[in-house]
Every structure is written in C-alpha cells, then in structure tokens.
Amino acid sequence: DAGVTQSPTHLIKTRGQQVTLRCSPKSGHDTVSWYQQALGQGPQFIFQYYEEEERQRGNFPDRFSGHQFPNYSSELNVNALLLGDSALYLCASSLAPTLADYEQYFGPGTRLTVT
Amino acid sequence: DQQVKQNSPSLSVQEGRISILNCDYTNSMFDYFLWYKKYPAEGPTFLISISSIKDKNEDGRFTVFLNKSAKHLSLHIVPSQPGDSAVYFCAASTAGNTGKLIFGQGTTLQVKP
C-alpha cells in the first residue's frame, strides 16, 4: 500500500524565484493538505484541497497557491520566494468528509532552502 | 497566538519507565485531539487520538488523557522503549474545520537504554 509521496526531497532556490512542490496521496485518499514546518516548530496548516478545490486555508499570503488534479495528487506553488519561506513542506492526505478526515497521513516532506 | 502549546522542548526517561508528554490549548472549540510522532527525515506518523467527549483513550502502551476544564491533555507511554525516541506533536481540530490541524511546537523524547 503506497503511502504519501512527495517530490523533490530537497530544493534550493533564490529569493524572488518561484517553486512547485508535488504530492501524491495515500492510496484511497481523496483529500490533500499542505503544511509548513519551520525549524524547531510544529507544522502550520497552509491549505487543503478536496474535489479539486481549495476547501480551507490557513494564515498564509496569496503567494502560496495550490492545485489538485483529478487523480487526487496535488501541487503547492510559492511565488516571489522570501528567505523566511525556508522550511520543511509537508503534504498530508486523508478521507473527507468523514471523521477520518481528522487523521491525516503525512509524507516525508520537501526541504526548501531559499538563499 | 499559539493555540496549542507544548511547554517542554525535551524529555529524557529510562527504558521501562513511564514517559509523560504534556500539551495545553486555549481554544475551547477544539473537539478532537491527536498525537503524532516524528522521526528524523520522515513525516509525522499518527499515534493516538481522543474526542472531547472522552477523558481517556488507550491503545497498547499509549494512553491519552484529556482534562477539558484545564484545557490540558497528556500522552503516557508505558513502558518506554528506546524506539520511542522521537519528536512528539500534539494537534487539535474543530468540528467545522476537520481537515485543519493546529500543532504544538513538539517535544523531543529520548529513551535511554
């Protein structure tokens, strides 16, 4: 049973550039959430996609955008990168809108470094 | 505004003893609480959860206690094993936003052989 996969593993970008991170959910899951984890902090919710639409959004600027495809995979796009965007970006999948939506399965993350 | 707080950055216990990890929250609308464990270079792994209508949930060596009046929950691991050494995150969610988990800062647990 394939778990949540993310690509790439690591990424180095320059300030002002744009980046796209990718996620494939756990087999059978149809909802994808994205989190940002800064060093020494817990994950912070960015947004969630279900049925190819943004369902919920956290306190992140519009520079952060996403997309979900018909096969439930998802992309996170960040424009005009800032040094403060350097973090581990985690993708989580779940089943919505059941109670199991609370229990999310995380991928290993993409480590983004902005220089 | 940190709605979920884990005030102990680290905890060290001896193998076989009890590990107690604590978590406090401020939002009384939270109705579901979860604990995740994270090893280096891996994503968080779901460990155990509890609904706000309960005060205790047990799963093998892991027990979560919820004290709603104190807005406090704790995770007990008995007996602790070296393989339990990891970062533990407390998370919470509300009925209207089931997919949005609010995480604490994490507590690093070290279990010494």
Image (cartoon, rainbow, N blue to C red):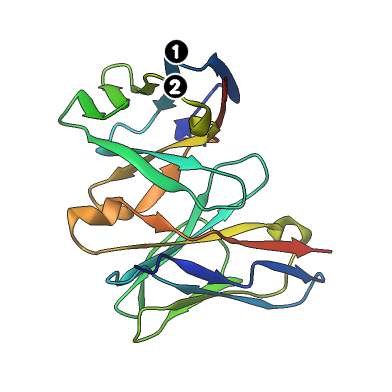
Chain of the residue where label 1 is placed in the rendered structure: B
As drawn, the label of residue A86 is none
Residue B25 x/y as whole percent:
40, 29
- Answer with left or right where residue B86 lies relative to residue A31: right
Q: Residue placed farthest to the left in the image? A: B53
Q: Which residue is mark 2?
A: B80
- Answer with left or right where residue B15 lies relative to residue B63: right
Residue B45 x/y as whole percent:
43, 47
Earlier-in-chain disc, 1 versus 2 = 1
Residue type, mark 1 in image: Arg
Taking B85 as reference, is A93 above or below it?
below
Taking B80 as reference, is B87 above or below it?
below
Name the residue located 73 percent from the left edge and 56 percent from the top edge: A84
Q: Which residue is mark 1?
A: B17
Residue B7 x/y as whole percent:
54, 22
Spatial separation of the CA atoms under disc 1 and disc 2: 6 Å
Chain of the residue where label 2 is placed in the rendered structure: B
The quarter of the picture where residue A60 lies is bottom right
